[in-house]
Amino acid sequence: MKAVYYLILAALAVRLVVAAFTGLGLDESYMVASAHSFDASYYDHPLASWWLELSARALTGSAAPLVVRLPFVALSGVTSWLIYATTNRLFGQKAGFWAVAAYSVSPFFSLAAGCWILPDGPLDAALATFMYALIRALGLPDGAPSPKWWLAVGLFAGLALLSKYNAALVLAGAAAAVMLDPASRPALRKPWPWVAVLLTLAMFSPVVWWNQAHHWSSFHYQGGRMAGLHLRLYMAPYIWFGESLFVLPWLWLPMILVLLRGLRAGPAVRASWLLCWAALLPVTLFSIVGIWSSTHILFHWATPGYLMLFPLLGQWAAGISPILRNRVAIASAAFLALPVLALSAIVSLPFMPVFGAGVPSGKSPLLQMVNWTSIVPQLPPGIDAIAAQRWYDGGKVGYALAIAGDKTPVTVFAGEVHEFYYTAPPASFIGKTVLVLARPWTTAQTISFCAKFFSSFTPGPTLRVTLHGTTLLTIPTFIGVDMRAVPVGEFQNSTGP
């Protein structure tokens, strides 16, 4: 038991260093910059992750990286403990330790979901608690069912759906496992599971209400990712390969093996049956959708399924050669911790060398890890708003302003406006003076696209994003005076040199 505590604390310590000493990434900056108030839902995702970072800012009055990331780091500790509690109950303490160890060295789960401002952190915590509650409600592995746990099942299923829409895949798989298990089906003849379902739906209802009031925009955006017809048979193995990198390939392969073994064993082995069915839809669906969808499938969409497999992975690891297992664990921990700690040092310590300084402007690999606060003193006076032409630039600029306490609104012209459409709608700046941001290779396109929407459109200062005195990005700007109409259409941007 003590070893698990030490393991969780060590992983938390690494995450705290990363949270404190690296800047917010593109998605993180966007979430902080675009959400200004508590709402029933948001354009990209439901409310949980947005409310967490908004609460951190409201309680502290600060938007510093450690402050806004701290709730997500704390939830990673909760997730770690729930993985241990579930695995220990089903397979014993040794399996529980190795399940947490695998979670702690997995790049996506331990670092991205466990540290960054993303919906995956609260999603993982809610799903891990949901699964623990469900095994208690069903009496797994060998105990009597406990009806009172169904209320926790409904509560945390609702919290999972309030975190991210793909939680529904895990919940549907778990429901299928219960219905297909002869030993679990009698529970469905009693009211408690159905009370849990009603509680889940009631908790999710604010998201439905928000979407109804906003033309179903979030549902359309997320559901549209399955649209299109672009037949690519190679995409399934490509997506699985990408998912394996997010988990670690030497963890991913035994995960797939225990998944297949659990499904083959059937409901006679109830614990593995439940976990495997909960994992099945996320692990398989996106690789299948990728065969025809014209949308780029992101590898982390399937991670809720892999989360459900950590208990089975822990059971498997507990039974293999101790020498091999320990060496792999140590190598995996070093593989994850050493690079992220080194990058944290490069970003935060002024005497560290800035690698990639010679690459073209905007192409430095450090740009995502650096807050763009250096541009704030360079902003010209007399502007009413700042407009980026891509949501991620708007996020980085908006977060830089938030750290500095600058209230200048940030919006996005053309392209994908996302949550900025609601918090800083371009139409609200009619008649205003707007600082329009370009990229070094898009100045001509910016003039062609934007000038016609303003009474005058003249060059502004060139903003420089720097790290320890080294310029990573130059941002040409234009000052648009008296915006006469909202810039519409698709800005023809390139990816640069």
Image: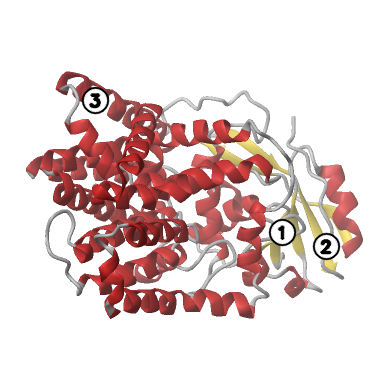
The Cα–Cα distance between marks 2 and 3, rounded to whole angstroms, is 54 Å
Residue 206 visible? The answer is yes
Q: Callout 1: helix, strand or loop?
A: strand
Image-based side of 469 in relation to 392, left or right? left
Q: Residue furthest left?
A: 2
Find out whether the residues at labels 1 and 3 contact each other: C-beta distance under 8 Å.
no
To which quarter of the image does residue 452 belong? bottom right
| Residue underneath mark 3 | 330
- The one of 269 and 113 positioned closer to us in this rendering: 269
Q: Which mark is residue 487?
A: 2
Q: Which label sits on residue 387?
A: 1
The mark nearer the N terminus, 1 or 3, is 3
Q: Residue at the spot x=41%, y=76% of the render?
A: 203
Would residue 24 be seen by someone viewing this image from the given angle? no
Residue occupying the point 62% across, 51% down: 392
What amino acid does circle 3 point to?
A: Ile
Q: Residue at x 60, y 74 (%)?
A: 211
**Is disc 2 surrounded by few (<14), some (14 to 19) or many (20+) residues within 10 Å?**
some
Q: Is residue 185 left or right of residue 480?
A: left
Q: Where is residue 485 drawn, in percent x and y?
A: 86, 69
Q: Residue at x 44, y 33 (%)?
A: 244
